[in-house]
Amino acid sequence: MRAMELIDEALHRKKRNRTWLAKQLGIGVAAIGQWDKRGVPAKQTKDIARLLELTRDQIEGDEAAPWAKDGSWPFPDAELLTRIERLTRDQKVEIQGKLRDVVKEYENKSTKQSGELGTLGRNQG
């Protein structure tokens, strides 16, 4: 999930907007607009986290959003989910298959890397 999607969702949930956030941070709204393209500056994440009651890990995408339920899609990308809902059943099945393949690929990479680390440790002793 992109940091700005999380920030925008958190602002929405707090009934705030980017103008409010910019004022709290002492910066211009245009600067926040640039974060969509350039990413959120690391020096701002601590203050943003405090203002929006998030963690830095959540803003940086290393931790699920606080409103994500266990087992749910942790990314507040409502627009993407809405677009997927508009697709035909066959298109959704195709996407599901591709997503399953990608997840399996990442699982295999993770397992392979864990195995390699374990082998390295045993060879050193």
Image (cartoon, rainbow, N blue to C red):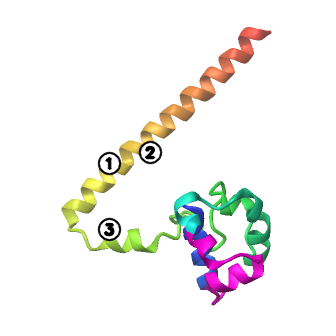
Sequence-first tag of 2 and 1: 1
In the structure shown, which secondary structural element does the residue marked by tag 1 occupy? helix
Amino acid tagged 2: Val
Dot label at residue 76: none
> Is label 2 in contact with label 3 (beta carbons under 8 Å)?
no
What is the crowding at mark 3: few (fewer than 14 residues within 10 Å), some, or many (at least 20)? some
Q: In which quadrant of the rendered view does residue 124 lie?
A: top right
What is the crowding at mark 1: few (fewer than 14 residues within 10 Å), some, or many (at least 20)? few
Query: Residue drawn at (52%, 61%), measured in percent from left and top?
Result: 37
In the structure shown, which secondary structural element does the residue marked by tag 3 occupy? helix
Q: Position of residue 119 (x, y in %)?
A: 66, 16
Amino acid tagged 3: Ile
In the structure shown, which secondary structural element does the residue marked by tag 2 occupy? helix
Q: Nearer the viewer, residue 106 or 50?
A: 50
Query: Residue drawn at (55%, 61%), measured in percent from left and top?
Result: 2
Alpha-carbon span between mark 1 and mark 3: 14 Å
- The residue at which mark 1 appears reads as 98
Residue mark closest to the camera, 2 vs 3: 3
Q: Which residues are magenta?
A: 13-33
Query: Residue drawn at (55%, 63%), measured in percent from left and top?
Result: 71
Q: Is 76 colored magenta in this rendering?
A: no
- The residue at which mark 2 appears reads as 103
Amino acid tagged 1: Lys
- The residue at which mark 3 appears reads as 84
Q: Tell me the quadrant of the picture where the N terminus can be found.
A: bottom right
What is the crowding at mark 2: few (fewer than 14 residues within 10 Å), some, or many (at least 20)? few
Alpha-carbon span between mark 2 and mark 3: 18 Å
Alpha-carbon span between mark 2 and mark 1: 9 Å
Q: Position of residue 17 (x, y in %)?
A: 61, 85
Residue 20 is left or right of residue 39, and the answer is right
Query: Residue drawn at (62%, 57%), measured in percent from left and top?
Result: 61
Sequence-first tag of 1 and 3: 3
